[in-house]
Amino acid sequence: MAKKLKALAIDKGSMVKIRGTTPPTYHASHLGEATMTPRTVARATAPAIPREIPATMRAAAIDRFGGPEVLSIHTLPVPEPNAKEVLIALDTAGVGTWDAGQRSGEWAEGKEDFPLVLGIDGAGTVVAVGKGVKHVAVGDYVYSYSYSNPKGGFYAEYVAVAAGKVAPVPDALDETHAGALPALGLTALQGVDDALELEDGESVIVHGASGNVGMLAVQFAKQRGARVLATASGPDGVDFVRRLGADEVIDGRRDDIGAAAKRFAPDGIDAVLAFVGGHELTGCLDVLRRGGRAAYPNGVEPKPRKRRGLRIKAYDAEAGRREFERLGRAIESAHLEIPIAEVFTLENAAKAHERLDRGHVLGRMVLRIR
């Protein structure tokens, strides 16, 4: 994924299959404690395109680095797209640990301008396009991923992003899942297909499988025909990942990865896809066969050390037309499940970050903006 993208922490959420018929119903007045249950309507009708784009918008932004309390609602100018950008009226935005890293200053790059709007992905309707944009039109329902977006993040009513980082939302996704998916889906899929080039019949350890990226990587690996040994966090994390289809799941902090791997693949594991660092990752690398390979997104700390006889690769997820097309095909063919932990309103973005900071969040958290 983009620079410094850490593997998401993991945690308890409801499972919502996205086979095209199950947008969520919310069971909380402010959505702060929302749970998701199926209903039978597909994606809600896209909002009407405004005759005039307003001059200002609501956005959840920070004026300084700090804890969740520094995140508050601002009234800010609506960004203006340049010739190669589009303006999206957002319905939903994803909430992840990288957002907390930006908010706290842990991932500060020294060039941030305040107020800083957080958020790296989301979904909504295109309401304006630059004169050089050809493949996106006003009225298109799209999702997007743009890390450190130059004109502000996705915790806002509007976002201006490069047209190349925008794609039509697959029919299988409702607004909530569309906003939750882009960063996670691109990172998981490119880890499986590009960094590892996982093949049918191979054995793979998905380390940190109960995290937000890991929960999708398990499903993509299975769709490619791999045998998946997954590590998760806690008994609830183990149950969570088992429901996603992993062949075997262990508690990464309590169980013996070496013994589990020996049972799972007596001749050695072919590959490791890691979303968590530390000594548990070292244990995963210990059980790779000679010539085996490992991959992890940049931001996983501490980084694994190079080893003779193993190919270890760090990668960043790319967001472009080709990458989004591949993701769309994978969503359809894998019958992907995207667990949603909680949905918060934009006004409750600080509460979402309080929950994020407590850790152990199984499933993606989402901001409902409209």
Image: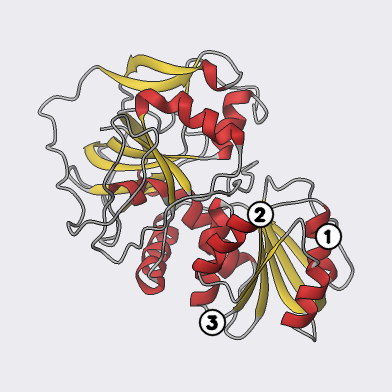
Q: Are marks 1 and 3 in contact (CB under 8 Å)?
A: no
Among the two numbered marks 1 and 3 on one chain, the one whose residue lies closer to the N terminus: 3
Residue 225 marker = 3
Residue lying at the far right of the rendered structure: 308
Residue that label 2 marks: 234
Q: Secondary structure at mark 2?
A: helix
Task: Pick whichever, 259 or 201, lies toward us.
Answer: 259
Identified at 39% across, 36% down, the residue is 33
Residue 175 left/right relative to 68? left
- What whole-number distance in Å separates the C-alpha atoms at marks 2 and 3? 27 Å
Residue that label 1 marks: 282
Decide if residue 113 is in sight here. no
Where residue 345 sits, quadrant-wise, is: top left
Q: Secondary structure at mark 1?
A: helix
Q: Percent x, y for residue 140?
A: 21, 48
What type is the residue that disc 1 sits on? Thr
Residue 70 left/right relative to 293? left
What type is the residue that disc 3 sits on? Gly
Among the two numbered marks 2 and 3 on one chain, the one whose residue lies closer to the N terminus: 3
**Which is closer to the viewer, label 2 or label 1?**
2
Q: Is residue 163 above or below residue 30?
A: below
